[in-house]
Image: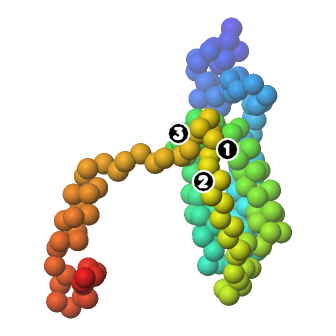
Amino acid sequence: MFLRRILTGGMGAVAMAKVKETTGIVGLEVVPNAREVLISLYKRTLKEIQAVPENEGYRKAVESFTRHRLQVCQDEEDWEMIEKRIGCGQVEELIEEAQDELKLIDKMIEWDPWGVPDDYECEVIEDDTPIPKHVPQHRPAPLPEEFYKTLEAVMSKPAPKDEPSTQSKA
């Protein structure tokens, strides 16, 4: 009877952490210690990203979201609150994502995309072959009318006297 009370939300329920029974995603098992796993992965990510040059956008982005997620995991004890605050899926999905990021960091270091010399010239091959009609083509949606109104307002507003004009005089 006493044990039933604890398990069903009676007196001692506060002492027991909520246990996730399933992720609801085929092939993705519940990780009972997900918070600790995430903290470990995020700390490792922050350590390994140090091999990427400081001024690279990739490093800045990875450090930014990893620090945020690590802070959330350190602040929250409950996996539900971690999921809610991060807002990018279940903790088990976050674990997979963090593991994938670590693999990508290794690949990025191997590929060294920031090591391209400034004077490197890439050969551009132009091909005027028509695209078959059955092949879908990406055509961006038109921009909202508000965009053009804002752009027109910005372009027609005179620049302050101490700043050079951004409009070109034709």
Mark 3, other Cα within 10 Å: few <14 / some 14–19 / many ≥20: few
Q: In this view, does 40 lie above or below 5?
A: below
Is 159 left, or right, of 108 in this rendering?
A: left
Q: What residue type is labelled 3?
A: Lys
Q: Can residue 69 be seen in this view?
A: yes
Location of residue 150 in the rendering, given as x and y in whole percent from the top left corner: 23, 60
Please state, as top left, top right, bottom left or bottom right, where the N terminus lies in the image. Answer: top right
| Dot in front, 3 or 1 | 1
Q: In which quarter of the image is residue 108?
A: bottom right
Across and down, in percent, residue 88 comes to 58, 42
Q: What element carries label 2?
A: helix
Callout 1: helix, strand or loop?
helix
Dot placed on the residue nearer the N-terminal end, 3 or 1: 3
What residue do we see at 26% from left, 63% from top?
A: 151
**C-alpha gap between disc 2 and disc 3:** 11 Å
Q: Quadrant of the C terminus?
A: bottom left
Position above or below: 95 against 55 = above
Residue at which label 2 appears:
69
Residue 84, label in figure: 3
Residue 61 left/right relative to 31: left
Q: Classify 10 Å Cα crowding around label 1: few (below 14), some (14-19), many (20 and above).
A: many
Asked whether the viewer can see residue 71, the reply is no
Q: Earlier in the sequence, mark 1 or mark 2?
A: 2
Amino acid type at mark 2: Arg
Image disc number at residue 72: none
The vertical placement of 68 against 8, above or below, is below
Q: Residue at x 21, y 64 (%)?
A: 152
Image spot of residue 56 (x, y percent) = 63, 74
